[in-house]
Amino acid sequence: MNLSRRSLLATGTGAVAATAAASSPALVADPTARHRLRTGFERLADDGYGLLAGERVGIVTNPTGVNRDVRHIVDVMHADERVDLVAVFGPEHGFRGTGQAGSSEGRYDDPATGLPVFDTYHTDGQALADIFTEVRVDTVVFDIQDAGSRFYTYIWTLYDCMGAAELAGKRFVVLDRPNPVSGRSAEGPVLHKEFATFVGREPIAQAHGMTVAELARLFNGEFLERPVELDTVLMSGWRRDDFYDSSGLPWVPPSPNMPTPETALVYAGTCLFEATNLSEGRGTTRPFELLGAEGIDRRWAQAANELGLPGVHFREAYFAPTFSKFQGKTIGGVQLHVHDREAFDAVATGIGLLVTAKRSWDGFAWRSDNWIDKLTGSTQVRTMIDAGAGPDEVVAAWQDELAEFRDLRRKYLAYR
């Protein structure tokens, strides 16, 4: 295989070959290089962009697509004559990140580079394939920092773009970045296919424990109707038990309400409060770490602490969101304080908080559209909590499906 054109092969001690028939081997990770992490983009650039030589390139990215000097890779590649970068595709929140939750930036020309920017948010299938065809790209590159949760929409932008690239006959390249909450294990309920939405297209666990390159291999091997021609450029120096702070990389908020890696650590569990009438902390400096509503007092924090959940304490807290639920009102609730992230289980914690919120505050209610079913992937969590089940019972109910997903996931893991 042509080294400069296709896959930049290396020895495989740090990676497991993808089993998807249409996924070519990738730049493999070097397990001896821990704490000298190189992202997929850095490894691509170190090789002189050989993987993209002679190609018209479009890139799916957002503000997280930066090098360690926080210069955006679009600006870097646009200025490099070795890359023929012709278009940018923005996800939810947009390429430059000006959109709030549930919005994007639309179609425009980027002022910094003059490149056309296309909106992929809620665009998929043939409509998205037609955009790839219109701009005459040969290869679509993906480089976005994920948060590690099934309902974080960038992984479904990845999925949709892979499917559209196949329809348009384009090659797809994924540049890998760390899972910020580590890749130790998958946790939480697995999506039931009848609940598929843009916060979960396919049956994966709520906290998937994979990088975007690993997910791309999984999507290609298991879920896409027809696999795309796929190359994945892995990191070097990343291991499955690494949290983001060991990477040496700058943290750029991947969305407006993901300000720190600590936010990502709790997000897979506390984002479930989006589906309730409680604030999930949007409009505060600690979104998803602060939760509350009018009428809640110290009893919720006390009940949550009595669960003895591993790795986390709960503090009685009062706050006034500047936007979103309860804007401008002082409300009561809890703040999560994770003291042992190795032991912390975000999803089980989220379930414990839902159960204790419902038991300690008589104003608790689900959103009328049953958004909780879309976030958790079935009716199971909602109906069990409504029936009075405790946190351990709810968590136990999804273990068989989770075990099946863990077995499937194992085939696509690229780092030890």
Image: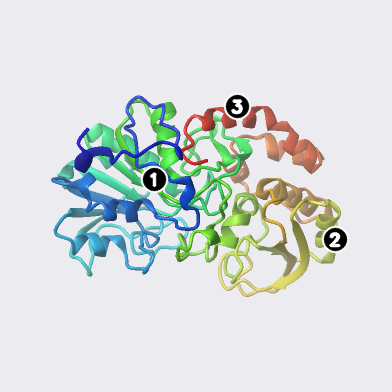
Q: Earlier in the sequence, mark 2 or mark 3?
A: 2
Question: What residue would you read off at disc 2?
Answer: 302
Q: Which mark is residue 293?
A: none
Residue type of the residue flagged with mark 2: Gln
Residue type of the residue flagged with mark 1: Leu
Tell me: residue 293, above or below residue 91.
below
Direction from residue 349 to residue 373 in the image, left or right = left
Question: What residue would you read off at disc 3?
Answer: 404
Question: What residue would you read off at disc 1?
Answer: 234
Residue density around tag 1, few if under 14, some if 14–19, many if 20 or more, within 10 Å = many
Q: Earlier in the sequence, mark 1 or mark 2?
A: 1
User: Front-most of 281 and 59?
Assistant: 59
Image coordinates of residue 133 in percent, x first then y, are 18, 41
Instruction: Name the front one of labels 2 and 3.
Output: 3
Q: Earlier in the sequence, mark 3 or mark 1?
A: 1
User: Front-most of 401 and 343?
Assistant: 343
CA gap between label 1 and label 2 equals 44 Å
Snapshot quadrant of residue 107: bottom left
Q: Residue at x 42, y 44 (%)?
A: 29
User: Front-most of 409 and 329?
Assistant: 409
Residue density around tag 3, few if under 14, some if 14–19, many if 20 or more, within 10 Å = few
CA gap between label 3 and label 1 equals 25 Å
Direction from residue 367 to residue 236 in the image, left or right = left
Instruction: Name the front one of labels 3 and 1.
Output: 1
Q: Is residue 296 visible?
A: yes
